[in-house]
Amino acid sequence: MSAKVNKVVLAYSGGLDTSIIVPWLKQNYGNPEVICYCANIGQGDELSGLEEKAIATGASKCYVEDLREEFVRDFLFPLLQSGAVYERTYLLGTSVARPLIARRQVEIALQEGADALAHGCTGKGNDQVRFELTYMAFAPHLKVIAPWREWNIRSREDALDYAAEHNVPVTATPKSIYSRDRNIWHMSHEGGILEDPWNEPEEAMYTLTTSPEAAPDEPEYVVVGFEQGVPVSVNGKRLGPVELLLTLNDIGAKHGIGRVDLVENRLVGMKSHGVYETPGGTILRVAHQGLEQLTLDRDTLHYKDVIAHRYAELVYYGQWYTPLREALDAFVRVTQRNVTGETRLKLYKGNVTLVGRRAAKSLYNPDIASFTMSDSYNQKDAEGFIKIFGLPVKVQALLEGRSRVEG
C-alpha cells in the first residue's frame, strides 16, 4: 500500500479508466474517502447517470457541474481571438479544456478539505502535464496521485479484468477500440486502426460530422457577427456563447466541416496519430480570420501570427495559468478592438469558403485599392519608394561588382 491519504478528489469522466481508479485508490491508499468531480463542458449523453455510477463504484459523492458557459466565454473565445492552432491544423479542443477542469477540481478539493488530487491521465500523454501544472498553480501543497504511473494495468483488457474483479459497472467492451474525448468544441479519436498512420480513418469512427460525400449537394451560406473579436450572432440572430457554438456545430456537422487527420508531436516527446472533428470551431476560425483581414494593419496582423504560434504551444503544453499567457492575452485584446463586423461563409461538402466580410472600421479603402485611377494614390510615388526600399540590395550588388546578369 502507498502512503495513506484521508480524502482525495478524482477528476472523473465515468469511463473505464476513472471508474476503476475509485476502488484502486481505496485499495492502495488506505481506504480514503473518494470524491469524484466531473465538469460538463459539452460531453452530451456521456454524462447520463454519472453520479449514480460514481457512487456504485465506491465514491462518497460526485460533483457534476455545468461549466459550458465559462468554457466557451473564458477559454474558447480567447483561444479563437488569439488565432492559435497547434502544428498547422489542431484547434486544441482537448488541450484548452483541461485547465478549467483541473482548476475547478482543485477548488472542490480545498472546499472539501481533501489532502490529495487524482486523475486518470496516462504517463504517455499530454493531459497529465495539463492537469498537474494547474494543480501546481492553485494548490501546490496537495498530493497528486496518477494511477497510470503506478499500477500494473497495461491495457484495456487489464482494466476490464480489474473492473470485473472489483464489481465496477462499466459499459466498455474490448470492441470499443477508440479512445475519445468530447466537449462542445470538438471530438477527438485515437487508437484502433489509427495507430498505423497509413490507414484511412473508417467512416464509422466519426461521431459528430456527416461525411463530405454524403453532405448536401447544395451549399449553405452562413453569416457570423463579431464584436471586438467575440462571435455574437449567426445569420443576424444574436446568441449566447453556448447557443452560438451549438448552432454552428449543427450547421457545420451537416456539411462535413472540421475533420482533421494529424500526426502530432506530444509534449512528452513521442508522435501520436489523432483524428479531430471541430465543425463549429472551424467555421468560427475562418470567419474570424476574414474579419481580421479588414481590420488589422499589416504589421499587427503579421506579428499576431507569431504570437498565435507561441499561444498554441502554451495551450498544448498546459501552461494556461502562466504570466506569459496572461501577457499574450493582453496583446490579443488590443488587436481585437476593431474586429467588429460580419463575415459570410459558404459551406459545401467539407469546405468552408470565405465569400464576404464587412466591418465598420475596415482599413480596406476601395478608392485606394481600385485599379481605376484616382486622386487618393499617386502611382508616381512608387518610384521613390522602390529606390529607398531597394537601397540595401543595390549597395550589396555594387559591393560585389554585380553590374550585369551572369549567364
Image (cartoon, rainbow, N blue to C red):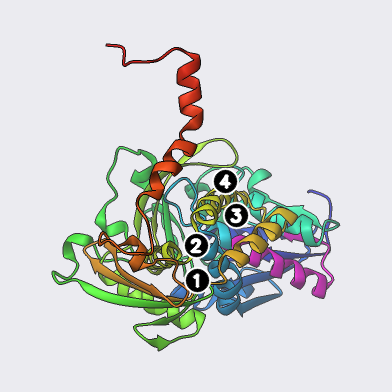
- Which residue is at 70% across, 58% downward? 327
Q: Which residue is mark 2?
A: 296
- Which residue is at 49% across, 21% downward? 396
SS state under label 3? helix
Kind of residue sitting beneath label 2: Leu
Of callouts 4 and 3, the N-terminal one: 4
Tell me, for residue 315, which label it has, or none.
3
Q: Which residue is mark 1?
A: 339
Of callouts 3 and 2, the N-terminal one: 2
Q: Is residue 189 magenta?
A: no
The residue most toward the left is 217
Kind of residue sitting beneath label 4: Gly
Could you tell me if the residues under marks 4 and 3 are in contact, i.e. CB atoms within 8 Å?
Answer: no
- Above or below, 184 against 155 in this view is below
Could you tell me if the residues under marks 3 and 2 are in contact, i.e. CB atoms within 8 Å?
Answer: no
Q: Is residue 334 left or right of residue 3?
A: left
Q: CA distance from mark 4 to mark 2?
A: 37 Å
At label 4, counting other C-alpha atoms closer than 10 Å, the crowd grade (few under 14, some 14-19, many 20 or more) is some
The majority secondary structure of the magenta stretch comes to helix
Q: Is residue 353 left or right of residue 364?
A: left
Kind of residue sitting beneath label 3: Val
Residue 254 in view: yes
At label 2, counting other C-alpha atoms closer than 10 Å, the crowd grade (few under 14, some 14-19, many 20 or more) is many
SS state under label 2? loop
Q: CA distance from mark 3 to mark 1?
A: 23 Å
- Above or below, 346 against 247 in this view is above
- Foreground mark, 4 or 3, reads 3
Could you tell me if the residues under marks 1 and 2 are in contact, i.e. CB atoms within 8 Å?
Answer: yes
Of callouts 4 and 2, the N-terminal one: 4
* Range of residues picked out in magenta: 97-117
Q: Could you say which is closer to the camera, residue 213 or residue 169?
A: 213
Q: Which residue is mark 4?
A: 125
